Image (spheres, rainbow, N blue to C red):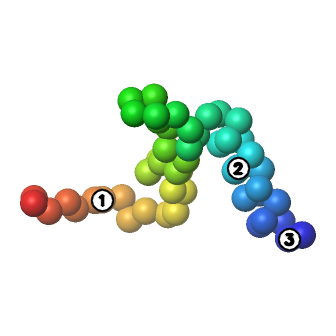
């Protein structure tokens, strides 16, 4: 098993333990959130109206 897949499995297990991807309606917690993206950023975000 490569190191990358071991880290991924650990993250997935932690998310399940935190209750992510479970619940209904207002109690639902998404499995992946926007803040989970740890990719490098250029420091700005542009959103168009619409």
Compare residues 34 and 40 and report the one nearer the observer: 34
Picture layout, residue 41 above or below residue 10: below
Callout 3: few (<14), some (14-19), or many (20+) C-alpha neighbours within 10 Å? Answer: few
Q: Give the mark toward the camera: 1 or 3.
A: 3
The count of marks equals 3
- For the point 74% across and 46% down, which residue is it? 13
Quarter of the figure with the N terminus? bottom right
Q: Residue 24 appears at what percent x and percent y?
A: 46, 34
- Residue of label 3: 2
Picture layout, residue 1 above or below residue 33: below
Q: Secondary structure at mark 3?
A: loop
Contact, mark 1 vs mark 2 (Cβ under 8 Å)? no
- Residue of label 1: 44
- For the point 85% across and 70% down, which residue is it? 2
Viewed as shown, does residue 26 lie left or right of 47? right
Q: Residue 5 appears at what percent x and percent y?
A: 78, 65
Q: Quadrant of residue 14?
A: top right
Callout 1: few (<14), some (14-19), or many (20+) C-alpha neighbours within 10 Å? Answer: few
Viewed as shown, does residue 48 lie left or right of 8? left
**Mark pair 1, 2: CA separation:** 27 Å
Quarter of the figure with the C terminus? bottom left
Earlier residue among tags 1 and 2: 2
- Residue of label 2: 11
Q: Residue 29 appears at what percent x and percent y?
A: 50, 37
């Amino acid at each position: 098993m490569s190191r990358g897949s071991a880290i991924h499995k650990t993250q997935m297990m932690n998310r399940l333990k935190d209750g992510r991807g479970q619940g209904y309606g207002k109690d639902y917690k998404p499995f992946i959130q926007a803040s989970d993206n740890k990719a490098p950023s250029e420091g700005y975000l542009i959103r168009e109206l619409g």
